[in-house]
Amino acid sequence: MEVLQRPLALVEADRVRWANSALADLLAVAREDLIDSTLPIVGGLNLDRIRRSSTEVALRHTTGYLLDVVVTTTLVSTTTWMLEFAMADYEDHKSADYFRKLQALADNLPIGILISETGLRIGYVNNSLATIFGLIPSDMLGMGWLDAFAEQDRGMLRGLALTALTGVPVRTTMVVSTAHIDLRTLDIALIPVTSRDASVSFIGTIQDVTEQVANEARLSFEVDHDALTGLANRRRLESDITDRLARLSSGELQGAMIGFCDIDNFKLINDTLGHLAGDRVLIEVAHRLQEAGLAAYRFAGDEFVVLIDEDPRSVREIEMVLADTISNAIAIGTALLSVNTSVGVTPIEAGDTASEVIRKADRAMYARKQMRAS
């Protein structure tokens, strides 16, 4: 057995019962010192009851240096294993070259990357991360990465990093501002990594998503709002009515009304003064409804809808308020255009659908319009 070049050990109940000279030489210890001791494997080695398996581990040399080795375990009895050690052949696996390629990739990725070395200290920052903060990578090494954030944000970032060091991945989106950058929205993820010596560090990504968030907000707004007036549109109106119907049914909302408003003779305005004048009227009506603090919607064309919750006033009183809010002169160029509106208000009743609520309000508006015409 002694002529074998591979380091060997017999292990029983996690204790070395026999070791050859090659293993003693590898660890720089006397053979007798290995007997009845535990092997200096970082993190220990779980010996499963299987015939044979190979695992990469770190052996601690007498000097404290970590040796990367592959240990192959063979079960030789119900309680005893033969362990065979081999230096991990990184050249064959081209690990060093692989690492260099990964670093080159990280250096040039458009997403910010940081890697901790000990605790909260950062040992690597790529160019993209430094650019986000208007700095150079060396400015963010050590604890400097926390200094890149505004003072009021550092506590939160420190907490996220400490959580990652406990082995829990974390992710958040936050708005930051520093002396070097304007207000930006950052997506931050910290991923824990356990090293061979069982210590925990983390890899982090920081991505500037300011434009993405702004675009998503714009698209979301456009889906539910009218492009000309900026008011919520018919789609949003139906959703909000459905919500009120549910709250009325549950008793959360004690009462609600809907007002339907139609600008009188709007086609005549378009035909005589042009569509730009018509658009100016629609924009001004929307502005007046918003200024009055009303939940207003552009339903279609020259038709507007308002929703009123738990208002003690009567239907007729609210109709008069809405008519007065809209029916004032509007300046078109150097002229003042008299604008009148027909308004119908009706209660929203639990048990109706959103479509039925809108139809009732529409009929109430036309009834008022006919009364005024007669």
Image (tube, rainbow, N blue to C red):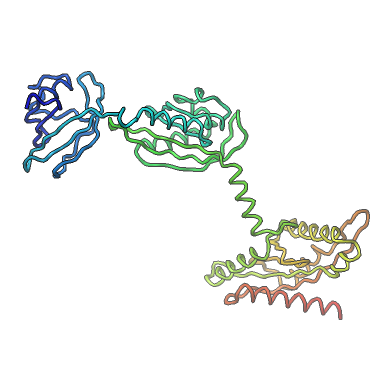
Q: In the picture shown, does residue 60 fall above or below 347?
A: above
Q: In the picture shown, does residue 357 fall above or below 227?
A: below
**161 or 134: which is nearer to us?**
134
Image point (74%, 77%), residue name: 364
Measured as percent of width and height from the top left, residue 327 is found at: 83, 64
Residue extending farthest front: 92
**307 or 242: which is nearer to us?**
242
Residue 339 relative to residue 238: left or right: right
Residue 129 relative to residue 81: left or right: right
Image point (13%, 23%), residue name: 22
Looking at the rendered image, the quarter that the N terminus falls into is top left
Rendered image quadrant of residue 307 = bottom right
Image point (18%, 22%), residue name: 26
Image point (78%, 66%), residue name: 302
Measured as percent of width and height from the top left, residue 100 is found at: 41, 28
Residue extending farthest bottom: 374
**335 or 135: which is nearer to us?**
135
Measured as percent of width and height from the top left, residue 83 is found at: 14, 33
Measured as percent of width and height from the top left, residue 76 is found at: 7, 40
Residue 3 relative to residue 103: left or right: left
